[in-house]
Image (tube, rainbow, N blue to C red):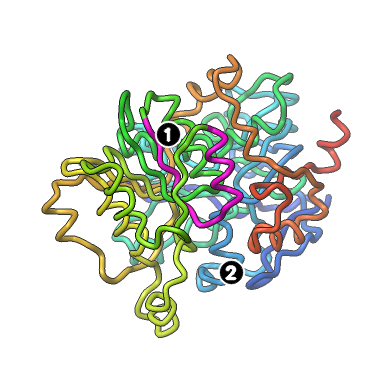
Amino acid sequence: MAEVAKPVYTTEYKPHSSEKMKAALWMGPKSIELGEVPKPTITAPKDAIVHITHCTICGSHLHMYSGDLNKAMKKGLIMGHEAIGIVEEVGPEVKNLKAGDRVVILPVIACGECFYCKRREYSLCDQTNPSKELELMYGHRLSGIFGYSTITGGYPGNQAEYCRVPNADLTCVKTPKEIDAKKLVALADVTPTAWHGCELAEVGEGDVVGVWGCGVIGLSIQRLAKFRGARKVYAIDKDANRLEIAKSFGMIPVNVNEHRDPADYILSVEPNGLDRGIEASGFRSTNSAAHATMKALGIEGDSSDTVTAVIKATRKGGNVALIGDFFFTTNNFPIGMLMEKTITLRGGQLFAQKYFPFLLDIVVEGKYDPSFIFTHEDNLENISQGYDAFFNHTVPGGLKVCLATAFGRAQK
């Protein structure tokens, strides 16, 4: 393998424009404020400036909102990595985009040139994340991500009126202008992340699949597993409303409040176990006293509860994928069960640029509609309340909010 390239992408937009824009700013735990900041300008020849029309709040942002990533946050960081908009300006080396194009901004910022990008493993990019902290934590850097802490590069996000997009030819995707905005925002992150979960688990024709989590990622994984030919899909959660949504899509609901050990229940009805088990609930998936105690004492960051259940419920020789975010360390990981059952375990952030052409095609062709994830619509100006509602599970309809900027509202 060639020597790892040093990161070359700037995460700051300098010099700043004298113009101002509205943006969602992280001001501390459970404090997101809509403030005024300088509008970004072209900083590098491959940049584009996108005038945002619609954006949304990602479940992964709850790490930052709740305070779990305090040490990796900087006051005033612009949040967000799921947005669409209209290109306003491009740098001199941008070849595939021009002013006026409607685009989806992908969350992963990749160089397209390093060892991993050439393998189309874009979230593993060597060049777009200068974080030494992440390298110390994991032994390597991962790609830059918009609006997602200093350990993913400190890039300003796109819960804002404008966004500077580095390496725009790879990070932006031109889209038809007539497609509903909610479908495109859902394609920015949720749908390719869900597809990534199916890819990691190798979901295929005739499989029996279990998905832990019925948030928008989990529900999308379930539906895409069916799209890929899965014979049965079990949906595991403790939220009755979300389980009803899963049931309405043809999934088999498993309520954790009724089956305290969902793995035992699944094995009672599927003695061979699941062919593919996918963890899509992540860091907020447990309320166990043991985890709360260890977390308070600083000896555990992530819980192994759902991971243990997934591995237990998966058949010998099956596949397990981790798509719910885990960042830190965990205790009581069932390494013996994983090893002795010959289970393949994979995880990681999405390869957005790899999947996007196919996913855009199936949406444009009407084969898959990802917009179901949005059960509420609102304005960017109300994003502070949106974070609070998302964190407390009080979003109308129970899933996700699509936020329109003033510019986006004027496009109708």
| Residue extending farthest top | 365
- Residue 35 or 378: which is nearer the viewer? 378
Q: CA distance from mark 1 to mark 2?
A: 33 Å
Location of residue 27 in the rendering, given as x and y in whole percent from the top left corner = 69, 70
Residue 144 place in picture, x, y as percent: 48, 49
| Image label count | 2
Query: With 93 as the anchor, is 120 left or right in this view?
Result: left
Q: Residue at x 61, y 50 (%)?
A: 241
Depth check, mark 1 against mark 2: the one in front is 2
Q: Residue at x 69, y 59 (%)?
A: 387
Give, as a three-letter code, the residue at label 1: Gly
302 relative to 405, above or below: below
Nearer to me, 129 or 283: 283
Q: Under tag 2, what secondary structure?
A: helix
For residue 51, side relative to residue 44 (left or right) = right
| Residue 46 appears in the picture as rendered | no
User: What residue is shown with label 2?
Assistant: 66
Read off the residue under disc 1: 112
* Residue 236 locus on image (x, y percent): 44, 50
Left or right position of 399 against 71: right
Crowding near the residue tagged with mark 1, few <14, some 14–19, many ≥20 C-alpha atoms within 10 Å: many
**Closer-to-camera residue (353/368):** 368
Q: Earlier in the sequence, mark 1 or mark 2?
A: 2
Tag of residue 341: none
Which residue lies most toward the bottom here? 297
Q: Which residues are magenta?
A: 232-249
Q: Is residue 398 magenta?
A: no
Mark 2: which amino acid?
Ser
In the displayed structure, 193 sits above or below 330; it is above
